[in-house]
């Protein structure tokens, strides 16, 4: 199959979007995800920031797991969690995922899809964007946007 799809992630819910994208990657699609910083995570911002700060404390001095602070890496890692990335089929699917902050020049004119079933407008409670969360946990967005 191996078709290339550009998905505008503006306003999509992180978990729902990640599961749909993972299924499509396993089916053989190559996915370019744009506007990663505008993806929504449901929950109270203060609680989410507190949880993430505790989460990224693990390790130190170059040891332990790596916890990313940049929005596109947070999104990429979330999708990886929904893939069987330790087996060849999952690893190949993960390599077909490309996540971008904003919209790169080469993708500006491309036709962009959205995932209406994953849109954050259905949320009835508080939410925070991945970009806001990333800034709160230490991402320096200097030079972006």
Image: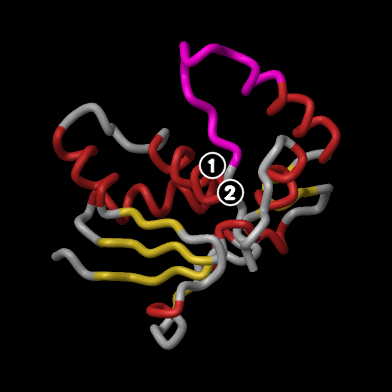
| Residue at 39% across, 71% down | 6
104 with respect to 83 (left or right): right
- Give the label on residue 19, or none: none
17 with respect to 139 (left or right): left
**Image location (x, y in percent) of residue 2:** 17, 64
Looking at the magenta stretch, what is its main secondary structure? Answer: loop
Q: Nearer the viewer, residue 3 or 75?
A: 75
Label 2 CA crowd tier, 10 Å (few <14, some 14–19, many 20+): many
139 with respect to 64 (left or right): right
* Circle 2/circle 1 CB separation < 8 Å: yes
Q: Nearer the viewer, residue 86 or 21?
A: 86
Q: Nearer the viewer, residue 51 or 61?
A: 61
| Residue at 39% across, 54% down | 21
**Image location (x, y in percent) of residue 68:** 54, 35
Which residue carries the number 2 mark?
71
- Secondary element at tag 2: helix
- Quarter the C terminus occupies: bottom right
77 with respect to 50 (left or right): left
Work out whether 98 lies above or below 14: below
Task: Provide the residue span drawn in magenta.
Answer: 54-69
Which residue carries the number 1 mark?
74
Outermost residue on the bottom side: it is 109
Work out whether 20 lies above or below 54: below
| Residue at 45% across, 68% down | 7
């Amino acid at each position: 199959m191996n078709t290339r799809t550009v998905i505008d992630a503006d306003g999509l819910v992180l978990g729902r979007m990640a599961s749909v994208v993972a299924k499509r990657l396993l089916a053989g699609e190559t996915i370019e995800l744009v506007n990663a910083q505008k993806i929504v995570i449901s929950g109270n911002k203060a609680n989410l920031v507190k949880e993430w700060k505790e989460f990224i404390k693990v390790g130190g001095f170059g040891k332990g797991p790596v916890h990313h602070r940049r929005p596109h890496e947070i999104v990429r890692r979330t999708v990886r969690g929904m893939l069987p990335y330790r087996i060849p089929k999952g690893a190949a699917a993960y390599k077909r995922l490309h996540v971008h902050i904003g919209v790169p020049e080469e993708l500006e004119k491309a036709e962009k899809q959205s995932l209406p079933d994953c849109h954050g407008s259905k949320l009835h409670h508080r939410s925070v964007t991945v970009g806001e969360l990333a800034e709160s946990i230490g991402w320096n967005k200097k030079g972006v946007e």
